[in-house]
Structures are given as structure tokens and as C-alpha cells.
Image: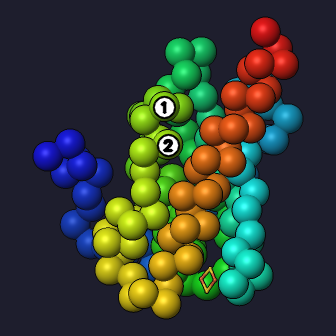
Amino acid sequence: AAASRLYHKNVVDHYERPRNVGSFDKNDPNVGTGLVGAPACGDVMKLQIKVDDEGNIVDSCFKTFGCGSAIASSSVATEWVKGKSLEEVTTIKNSDIAKHLSLPPVKLHCSMLAEDAIKAAVKDIKAKRAAQA
Ligand code: FES
Ligand code: FES
């Protein structure tokens, strides 16, 4: 039920029209950046979050140098993190993304990249805020 509002009509759409492709200034104090690589294939994903003072994610974008499944996974990830708190997004699992995109088993590591990128972005913004405090 809670996840249903996150559902778009056409999952395939993430392959054809990835959402939120782009970059934020990584030096912006309200931006967290996660940069991760997949050892299995060498693909790289950058996912960024913009966080308000209450610790809610107000915007997100990504750049992925990788396969179509990694790009689609990042697209879903940026959609799912928006509007969530830094605590909530750490519950986003790669298996949920894979299910959402109907990824085959050989492509599971592509969605893993998205989960790792979210966690890395959260870690980055938390470290930034801790340094400011
Ligand atoms: Fe876009 Fe589900 S189809 S997040
Ligand atoms: Fe490696 Fe998709 S084949 S991220």
C-alpha cells in the first residue's frame, strides 16, 4: 500500500525515459553524493540527494556509466528516495528495485549498484552535516 504511490504505469519507461538524469554541485552543503562501482562489470553510478534541514530528501539525480539495467535502476532509485527521510531510504532494497523492473538474475548486481549508491549518498550528507555541527 505504502509503495503503491511510487508506482508509475509503465516500468519499461525507465529504460526508455530515465528520470532525473543530471548532477548537483557536490560541494553544496545540502547535497549528498554517492559514487559506487560494480566489481562484476566495472560500471559506475553516481547518485545525489538534496536534503532539507529536517533531513528529508527533496530532490535526487544520477549519472550512470553502465548497462541499461543500471540506468533504469538509478532512475527508479531517484524516484523512490524523493520525499523520504535519510533513515527511510536506507530501507530501499535492491531486490525491490529488481522486482520493480523485472530484472533477470544476471542483472541483479545492477540494482545492487543503486542500493549502494543511495547508502553512499546518505553517508556523504551525514558526514558533511556532522562536520558542520
Ligand atoms: Fe517509476 Fe516505478 S515505474 S518508480
Ligand atoms: Fe554491470 Fe549492469 S551489467 S551494472
- The residue positioned 48% from the left and 56% from the top of the image is 77
Q: CA distance from mark 2 to mark 1?
A: 6 Å
- The residue positioned 53% from the left and 32% from the top of the image is 86
Name which residue type carries label 1: Glu
In this rendering, position of residue 118 left or right of residue 10: right
Picture quarter with ligand 2: bottom right
- Residue 65 in view in this figure: no
Secondary element at image label 2: loop
Q: Looking at this rendering, what residue extends furthest in the left direction?
A: 1
Q: Position of residue 29 (x, y in %)?
A: 78, 26
Question: Quick one: quadrant of the C terminus?
Answer: top right
Residue occupied by mark 2: 90
Q: Position of residue 40 (x, y in %)?
A: 69, 84
Q: Position of residue 121 (x, y in %)?
A: 67, 44
Q: Is mark 2 within 8 Å of ligand 1?
A: no
Mark 1 packing: few (<14 Cα in 10 Å), some, or many (20+)?
A: few
Q: Position of residue 90 (x, y in %)?
A: 49, 43
Name which residue type carries label 2: Thr
Secondary element at image label 1: helix
- Residue 38 in view in this figure: yes
Q: Is mark 1 within 8 Å of ligand 1?
A: no
Q: For residue 87, which numbered disc appears in the image?
A: 1
Whether tag 2 and tag 1 are in contact, CB under 8 A, the answer is yes
For residue 53, above or below residue 86: above
